[in-house]
Amino acid sequence: MDHHSTSTVAKADEPYRNSQDSVRSDIGVTPGRALRILVFLEASTIAGAVKPIFEFVQESRRGATGASVEVTMVIYRRAQQASVLMDAVRELGVAAEVIEERRAFDLRVLSQLRDLVRRLRPDIIWTNNTKSHFLVYLSGVYRAASWIAFHHGYTREAWRTRIYNEIDRMSLPRAKRVVTVCNDFAAQLQRRGVPADRLRVLRNPVNYSSPVAAAEKESLREQLGVGNRTILLSVGRLSFEKGHADLLRAVSLMRSAAGAAFDSYLVIVGDGPERRNLEALCSELKLNDAVRFAGFQSDVRRYYAIADIFVLPSHSEGSPNVLLEAMAADVPVVAAAVGGIPEVLSDQVNALLVPRQNIDALSAAIKKLLHEPALRMKLAEQGKDVVARHTPQAYFSGVMALLNEVVA
């Protein structure tokens, strides 16, 4: 399916009725009025699933066709904690609402959701993660508007996350549409009970990065202490399914084979629950002088700008933003052939693709690019065509088509 296509509108099931809920069910949009969209965000930073939403809002303000939308973002806040995301939403100039939580699984959230929906009367409820999917379902507010659930894949590192993943089996079939980022994920969702006629595939967009000044690149190299060495870059959350341990072992293989001639440096940008384990593995493999954990970075452009090769060793992926960002920055890519990646990339054409969790193949592909500068140039050039198919404009058009479809 093309990244901005939709299929025939399906007849929705009868809405589930809950006697303790009394939110409105008179869905309808007055002609000429802007669509009111309530977007639920489960994040503390602008990363992953949040980036496409920001691109959608920004594109709606550029005078794009069909841009008649009013977006309100809903952010969870626990114990009055400060939120980088909230600051970014305010800077974007978007209306924002806060759901206050005392702890995990705080049932007070349900009444706050109902009050919020009664007050704002949205046409569209847009959820982005398992927690919000479940809360919108459990509170019954999905009956008050057209609910579109955006699915970005599952992670399994925390017990709460695993619980929400399983609860998705109850939640997602109630959504009017379930949007995911690749056909592989769509097939998984169908096996989990989401009707095929409610599934849509809409791939993530990428925004072309502005150039990074030479002085800024040199400053970062000095900060990292990498000198003029070749830079291997990986960007992503440090969780098990991202495969960073495989990458460390692949670099160890390369170093053992090259001996004193090894002249590369691996920079890993991101943070997450696996960081301590990865740092321990790095020490065990005696790679501390060849690897730098840069932590979370709000602006990754500088890192792409100094990278020679981008590596994505994930065990599971949908439509990874970081892959498109690397290609937009003209960095050649080595990636595991998982999830939606083979749906948009072709081995030896615009990337080198390797089997999942195959450390030997990963090491060999990285070495191949290191030793063949002409191939690096070819892949970087061909990557531009991939990026051109994943613009914010295409994403905006796809979302607007979906919104108009469900309120028609």
Image (cartoon, rainbow, N blue to C red):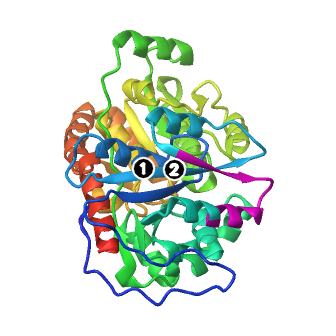
**Magenta segment, which residues?**
96-114
Identify the residue at image location x=53%, y=29%: 259
Q: Quadrant of the N terminus?
A: bottom left
| Left or right, residue 211 beside residue 14 | left
Question: Is 111 covered by the magenta stretch?
Answer: yes
Residue closer to the observer: 271 or 313? 271
As drawn, 87 above or below 179: above
- Residue 53 is marked as 1
Identify the residue at image location x=38%, y=79%: 198
Whether the residues at callouts 2 and 1 have beta carbons within 8 Å, the answer is yes
Q: Secondary structure at mark 2?
A: strand
**Mark 2 or mark 1: whose residue is earlier in sequence:** 1
Residue closer to the observer: 155 or 53? 53
Q: Position of residue 94 (x, y in %)?
A: 46, 42
Q: Secondary structure at mark 1?
A: helix
Q: Quadrant of the C terminus?
A: bottom left
| Left or right, residue 59 beside residue 265 | left
Is residue 154 among what the camera can see?
A: no
For this orientation, the residue located farthest to the bottom is 14
Which residue in the protein does label 2 denote?
73
